[in-house]
Image: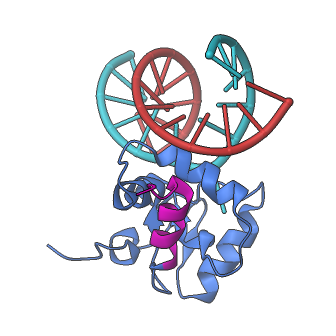
Chain colours: A blue, B cyan, C red
Amino acid sequence: MTAPSFAMRVLHVVCRIPPGRAATYGDVAALAGSPRAARAVGTVMRTCRAEGVPCHRVVAAGGRLGGYGGRPAMKRALLAAEGIIVIGARIADWRRVRWPRGARC
DNA sequence: CCGTTGACGTCGG
DNA sequence: ACCGACGCCAACG
């Protein structure tokens, strides 16, 4: 069995992120099977230009925006359109927005 | 194949 | 709370 590429697993996880929620690169990496590959997730996001992938729902640790091809305003707008409020470079109520966790426990 | 780069994470000052 | 250093993984030249 040829093991699926990291990019494929990452994209699969990102596609599972529901609207109005967001996950960190580290969380996506962990869900993809490599909890230490947060940076590699960023590489996948950068290389992936598929529109069916809500890459704007992937943020940095602590609810920070992280990067977006040098366009943080675009990411902020997309998140705001889903009800996610971004203050400065951070997401408001990050604890509630975070996925797959999200105000549980 | 090796060195560098990059949408990151965590710890320490 | 903010900045800097080290570590991690994959892609590119």
**Looking at the picture, how far across and down is residue A30, in whole percent?**
35, 55
Quadrant location, the N terminus of chain A = bottom left
Which of the 4 image quadrants contains residue A47?
A: bottom right
Q: How many labels does the image show?
A: 0
Confirm whether the magenta stretch covers residue A7: yes
Confirm whether the magenta stretch covers residue A88: no
User: For the point 50% across and 54% down, which residue is it?
Assistant: A6
| Highlighted range, magenta | A1-15
User: For the point 56% across and 57% down, which residue is it?
Assistant: A7
Q: In front: C9, or B11?
A: C9
**Looking at the picture, how far across and down is residue A18, in whole percent?**
45, 85
**Looking at the picture, how far across and down is residue A35, in whole percent?**
35, 48
From the viewer's perspective, tell me whether residue A57 is left or right of residue A78: left
User: For the point 32% across and 73% down, which residue is it?
Assistant: A100
Which of the 4 image quadrants contains residue A88?
A: bottom right
Magenta highlight: main SS: helix
**Looking at the picture, how far across and down is residue A95, in whole percent?**
33, 70
User: For the point 35% across and 62% down, which residue is it?
Assistant: A31
Question: In the image, is residue A3 above or below residue A36?
Answer: below
Q: In front: A103, or C3?
A: A103
Find the residue positioned furthest to the left: A105
Which of the 4 image quadrants contains residue B5?
A: top right
Find the residue positioned furthest to the front: A1
Q: In front: A48, or A76?
A: A48
Quadrant location, the C terminus of chain A = bottom left
Question: In the image, is residue A18 above or below residue A62?
Answer: below
From the viewer's perspective, tell me whether residue C8 is left or right of residue B6: left
Question: In the image, is residue C1 above or below residue A31?
Answer: above
